[in-house]
Image (cartoon, grey):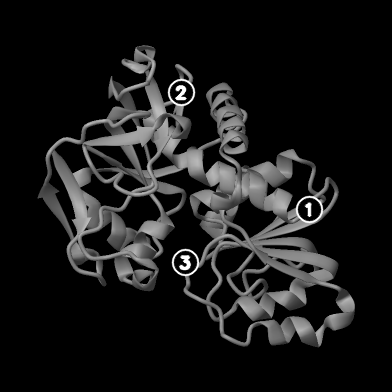
């Protein structure tokens, strides 16, 4: 079968199509003929080599979520899985024509939800949902989504709006993207700094909750945009790590009683993730949640997908199709 591996860390050109034997499902696993692969920001970070210290090596096959049809099962798995359309969290190895996944990481898909929509929603929706919960968000509070044009940001905007946020502000790179985010529930559109010439003068000057997908060198400046008792939760680092002394800004405003946290879905119990993802898939099939697929590209064009990611061209999620 065909797969895409990181042959050399660094630029997208370090990705290469390789041939591998088809995997065989072990006990507790299913084999999936892949129809859609979600291209996530973390894939680009891994490909860059920035996470090599965490055990990622050249030769790694990226891809944390896929959707497709179960074609075989391992020992101890109910054979009724065979033939079912499913979404699966693979963790890695998803850039391939066939993958294996543990049954507890596999969710049947509603009939009217496409594979591309499933991989645009499965992980991003869960991160958005639990990040808001991690921030102790309550209805009526104001929310700022920093870096809202990706799939996590888009889902955070929708979920915050649906949950009754008093305001949902977003930072993004263009008026066109801002208009699209307004259509999804944003009430205020700001530039990447949180203000600027493209900023919304009617936007709140402070927020109860900031969900940050960007991190990077500008993270500390957003502490000034938290209201007293405000909470910032970082769910990604597409702009890299914040400065080593980023907490200095927060400590300088000690009397505001602000809170800072990181969030990873890896800390959420599997049954809770499954419940939320199942609910999100059903909501998307009904049209109550909207997925944004930026583009469908063949698996062989993974390099192009990553070039688009690195260039900041993507609104929503790129999906690879074997």
Residue farthest to the left, as pictured: 19
Closer to the N terminus: mark 3 or mark 2? 2
Q: Which SS class for mark 1?
A: loop
Closer to the N terminus: mark 1 or mark 3? 1
Q: Which SS class for mark 2?
A: loop
Distance Cα–Cα, label 1 vs label 3:
24 Å
Quadrant assignment, res 103: top left
Query: Any mark on residue 238, and which?
Result: 3
158 relative to 136, above or below: above
Q: Position of residue 122 (x, y in %)?
A: 49, 38
Q: Which tag is nearer the camera, tag 1 or tag 3?
A: 1
Q: Which residue is disc 2 drawn over?
A: 109
Query: Any mark on residue 136, and which?
Result: 1
Closer to the N terminus: mark 1 or mark 2? 2
Residue at 17% of width from left, 63% of height from top?
7
User: Quick one: label 2, few (<14), some, or many (20+) residues within 10 Å?
Assistant: many
């Amino acid at each position: 079968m065909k797969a895409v591996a990181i042959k050399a860390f660094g630029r997208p050109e370090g990705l290469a199509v390789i041939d591998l034997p088809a995997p065989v499902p072990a006990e507790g696993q299913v084999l999936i003929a892949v129809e859609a692969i979600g291209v996530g920001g973390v894939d680009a970070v891994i490909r860059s080599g920035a996470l090599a210290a965490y055990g990622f090596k050249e030769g790694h096959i990226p891809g944390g979520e896929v959707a497709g049809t179960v074609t075989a099962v391992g020992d101890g798995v109910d054979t009724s899985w065979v033939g079912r359309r499913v979404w699966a969290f693979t963790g890695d190895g998803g850039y391939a024509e066939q993958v294996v996944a543990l049954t507890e990481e596999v969710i049947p898909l509603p009939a009217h939800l496409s594979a591309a929509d499933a991989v645009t929603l499965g992980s991003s929706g869960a991160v958005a949902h639990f990040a808001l919960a991690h921030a102790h968000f309550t209805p009526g509070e104001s929310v700022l989504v920093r870096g809202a044009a990706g799939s996590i940001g888009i889902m955070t905007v929708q979920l915050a709006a649906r949950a009754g946020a008093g305001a949902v502000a977003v930072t993004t790179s263009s008026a066109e993207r801002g208009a699209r985010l307004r259509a999804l529930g944003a009430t205020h559109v700001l530039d990447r700094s949180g203000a600027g010439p493209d900023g919304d003068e009617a936007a709140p000057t402070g927020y109860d909750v900031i969900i940050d997908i960007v991190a990077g060198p500008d993270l500390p400046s957003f502490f000034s945009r938290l209201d007293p008792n405000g909470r910032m939760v970082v769910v990604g680092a597409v702009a890299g790590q914040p400065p080593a002394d980023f907490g200095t800004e927060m400590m300088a405003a000690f009397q505001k009683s602000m809170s800072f946290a990181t969030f990873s879905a890896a800390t959420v119990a599997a049954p809770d993730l499954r419940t939320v993802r199942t609910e999100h898939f059903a909501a998307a099939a009904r049209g109550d949640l909207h997925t944004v697929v930026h583009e469908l590209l063949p698996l062989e064009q993974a390099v192009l997908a990553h070039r688009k990611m690195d260039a900041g061209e993507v609104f929503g999620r790129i999906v690879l199709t074997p």
